[in-house]
Image: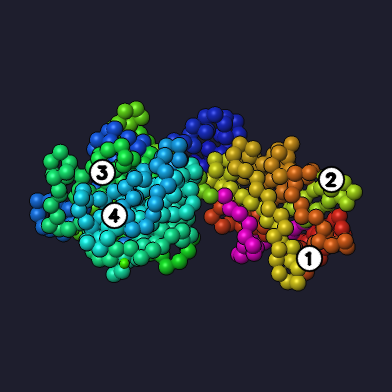
């Protein structure tokens, strides 16, 4: 009801509604953390500190004190090499990770059993020191500080010290590192290297800064972080698909930080651990400060607030909604290839406006995929991606319409998503002119092989999809394909 009201209001007063859409009561709270990398310029500030041991006793640390078992540290990160200027480092059997822009610091000053994570030249860097078993710095291969969110996972096997580093689910590096227990010793005594004993830095997992403020040679990370999960197992045995939403705790989760405390603005209080791990929670504290801008702050840009746009797979999506009626018309002139057009309709199907979500506020992003089949196998021939945003408008509370007279994106002129309910759903797409990326004819005789079919799909982020399957072309020559079906 509320949504409906917002939607109809949008037609008349877009300014007012766009403000309402950002009203925090309208959407689920999801925040990320933003550090500013002040580091030694703001000692003990612009960071999150999570205790891993109490130096006053020999009790075991909280669950976040990992390293006695296998473990996985993973998170989402966004940053730039403009703000993180540490150069590439020599990787291998050394502690060079401390010269990167440090994001996670579980160091012990001049003592063994420690680890950390940083960036050098935008590459992910994971470093570990065993107890008398040596050091290792493992480096990723791609620049991930490109102002986009990336999922990073590092893992370590206790028995042989093997290390893995995954970026966006792809294994970038692995190596045999130092063996054995690297958890913080329950009887650990911080050394006298911090203008006194390092009791304010050693027994912590520090996020967003080099923990000891040891000097300008050890820079801190400046950028965004969300969804930190620490697990007491190796989570990944090979490449994987990064999560599309927040982590849900399970029995192997020892610490889980959503950073959803909010509100947007200074982070000054407790960082909640949502793991539910026995012996926990492993809560942290925000240490807010540093010269303007001070950090850390909560921000509303998160890995999941702008869902990644869908792309067409090599194979058609499965389980898409079909409609009783469909039509497809493609034309590409042989004499003037710039004269070209694409028109697809899916209609009298079942669809509600909720199924389409909103391409206006970015809740929904869409792609249109056309597959020609050759000897029974699909070949992706066309991919059209109407961008989300204000080129879309809502009509009468049930229809989203993308209208661009100039066809500035891939020749797309009109996309209509009508969600009027059972038997009244409709999808229509029209594109034309030179920028429409038509594939050209399959042969001198036919535009598509259509053996046995041509499939057109509309795919939304999150996987919802709508499709028409064309098996009986009315026309299929070198410059035209036309097909239509109805009950
Ligand atoms: Ca202790
Ligand atoms: Ca080893
Ligand atoms: Ca311990
Ligand atoms: Ca979050």
Q: Which circle, 4 or 2, is nearer the viewer?
A: 4
State the residue at coordinates (31%, 69%): 160
Magenta residues, as a range?
309-327
Q: CA distance from mark 4 to mark 2?
A: 61 Å
**Sequence order check, earlier mark of 3 and 1:** 3
Residue 450 disc label: 1
Q: Is residue 175 visible?
A: yes
Q: Nearer the viewer, residue 277 or 363?
A: 277
Q: Vertically, is 5 above or below 463?
A: above
Q: Which circle, 2 or 1, is nearer the viewer?
A: 2
**Sequence order check, earlier mark of 3 and 4:** 4
Residue 477's quadrant in the figure?
bottom right
Q: Nearer the viewer, residue 195 or 419?
A: 195
Q: Under tag 4, what secondary structure?
A: strand
Describe residue 11's horizontal placement relative to residue 274 as left or right.
right
Q: Which circle, 4 or 1, is nearer the viewer?
A: 4
In this figure, which residue is indicated by the disc labeled 3? Answer: 211
The magenta stretch spans residue 319: yes
Residue 484's quadrant in the figure?
bottom right
In this figure, which residue is indicated by the disc labeled 4? Answer: 115
Q: Position of residue 341 (x, y in %)?
A: 80, 48
Ligand 4: does it lie within 8 Å of the C-beta at label 2? no
Q: CA distance from mark 3 to mark 4?
A: 12 Å
**Sequence order check, earlier mark of 4 and 1:** 4
Assess whether mark 2 and mark 3 are in contact (beta carbons under 8 angstroms): no
Q: Position of residue 395 (x, y in %)?
A: 64, 40
**Sequence order check, earlier mark of 4 and 2:** 4
Snapshot colouring:
rainbow
Q: Main secondary structure of the magenta part?
A: loop
In this figure, which residue is indicated by the disc labeled 2? Answer: 339
Q: Is residue 260 visible?
A: no
């Amino acid at each position: 009801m509320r949504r409906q009201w917002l939607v109809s209001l949008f037609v008349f007063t877009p300014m007012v509604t766009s403000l309402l859409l950002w009203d925090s009561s309208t959407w689920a709270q999801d925040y990320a953390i933003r550090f500013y990398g002040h580091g030694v310029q703001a000692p003990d500030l612009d960071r999150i500190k999570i205790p891993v041991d109490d130096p006053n006793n020999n009790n075991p640390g909280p669950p976040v004190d990992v390293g006695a078992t296998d473990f996985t540290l993973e998170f989402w990160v966004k940053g730039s090499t403009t703000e993180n200027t540490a150069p590439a480092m020599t990787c291998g059997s050394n502690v060079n990770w401390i010269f990167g822009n440090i994001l996670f610091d579980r160091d012990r000053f001049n003592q063994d059993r420690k680890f950390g994570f940083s960036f050098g030249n935008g590459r992910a860097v994971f470093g570990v020191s065993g107890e008398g078993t040596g050091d290792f710095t493992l480096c990723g291969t791609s620049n991930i500080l490109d102002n986009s969110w990336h999922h990073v996972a590092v893992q370590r096997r206790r028995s042989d010290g093997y290390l893995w580093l995954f970026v966006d689910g792809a294994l970038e590096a692995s190596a045999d590192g130092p063996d054995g227990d690297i958890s913080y010793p329950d009887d650990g005594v911080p050394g006298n290297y911090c203008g006194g004993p390092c009791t304010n830095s050693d027994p912590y997992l520090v996020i967003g800064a080099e923990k000891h403020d040891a000097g300008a040679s050890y820079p801190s990370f400046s950028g965004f972080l969300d969804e930190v999960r620490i697990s007491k197992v190796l989570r990944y045995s090979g490449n994987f698909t990064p999560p599309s939403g927040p982590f849900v705790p399970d029995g192997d989760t020892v610490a889980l930080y959503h950073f959803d405390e909010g509100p947007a603005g200074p982070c000054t209080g407790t960082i909640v651990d949502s793991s539910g791990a026995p012996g926990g929670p492993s809560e942290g504290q925000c240490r807010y400060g540093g010269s303007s801008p001070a950090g850390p702050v909560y921000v509303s840009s998160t890995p999941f607030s702008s869902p990644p746009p869908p792309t067409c797979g090599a194979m058609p999506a499965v389980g898409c909604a079909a409609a009783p009626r469909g039509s497809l018309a493609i034309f590409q002139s042989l004499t003037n290839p710039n004269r070209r057009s694409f028109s697809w309709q899916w209609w009298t199907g079942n669809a509600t406006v909720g199924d389409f979500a909103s391409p206006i506020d970015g809740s929904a992003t869409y792609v249109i995929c056309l597959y020609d089949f050759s000897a029974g196998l699909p070949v992706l021939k066309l991919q059209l991606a109407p961008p989300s945003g204000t080129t879309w408008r809502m009509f009468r509370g049930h229809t989203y319409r993308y209208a661009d007279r100039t066809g500035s994106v891939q020749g797309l002129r009109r996309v209509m998503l009508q969600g009027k309910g059972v038997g009244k759903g409709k999808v229509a797409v029209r594109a034309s002119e030179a920028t429409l990326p038509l594939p050209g004819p399959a042969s001198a005789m036919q535009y598509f092989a259509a053996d046995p079919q041509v499939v057109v799909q509309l795919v939304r982020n999150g996987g919802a999809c709508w499709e028409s399957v064309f098996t009986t072309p009315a026309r299929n020559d070198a410059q035209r394909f036309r097909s239509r079906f109805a009950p």
